[in-house]
Image: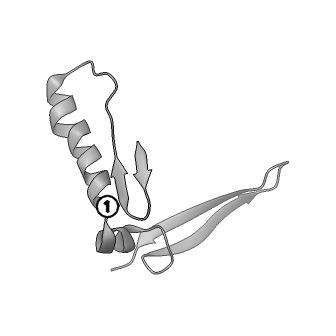
Amino acid sequence: MTYHWPDRKEFTILSEGGSKVLRDHVLRRLLEAEQEAANGELRERTAIHPRNYDFQLLNYFETPRDYYVLEAKPQD
């Protein structure tokens, strides 16, 4: 993937294998959706940000590195 600031992603497939149906109907569509989500208004509406999601702290682990477990629910 190459990211072009501020709102464009470009994917390059280096190799493929496995089910053609899976590649064409699932994986390629996933890449297309990622490209669309990087653009303008859709990027703003899908960003992981308090204006789009309600967050709740579910757990916290204090170790050499602190870990937070959050629940993120999309806002209506």
- Label 1: element kind: helix
Q: Amino acid at mark 1?
A: Ala
The quadrant holding residue 28 is: top left
The residue pinned by badge 1 equals 37
Residue 2 location in percent, x, y? 42, 45
Q: Residue at x 20, y 30 (%)?
A: 22
In-image side of 37 versus 58 (left or right): left
Q: Looking at this rendering, what residue extends furthest in the top direction? A: 17
- Quadrant in which the C terminus is drawn: bottom left
- Quadrant in which the N terminus is drawn: top left
Q: Badge 1: few (under 14), some or many (20 or more) residues near its Cα, within 10 Å? A: some
Where 40 falls versus 19 (above or below)? below
Q: Residue at x 72, y 60 (%)?
A: 60
The quadrant holding residue 16 is: top left
In-image side of 52 versus 26 (left or right): right
In front here: 44 or 14?
Answer: 14
Residue 49 location in percent, x, y? 50, 73
In front here: 61 or 35?
Answer: 35
Number of numbered tags placed on the structure image? 1
In front here: 2 or 74?
Answer: 2
Where 58 falls versus 28 (above or below)? below
Q: Residue at x 43, y 70 (%)?
A: 73
Report the coloring of the rendering.
Answer: one colour
Where 60 falls versus 65 (above or below)? below
Q: Looking at this rendering, what residue extends furthest in the front direction? A: 4
Residue 52 location in percent, x, y? 42, 76
The quadrant holding residue 27 is: top left
Residue 11 location in percent, x, y? 33, 41
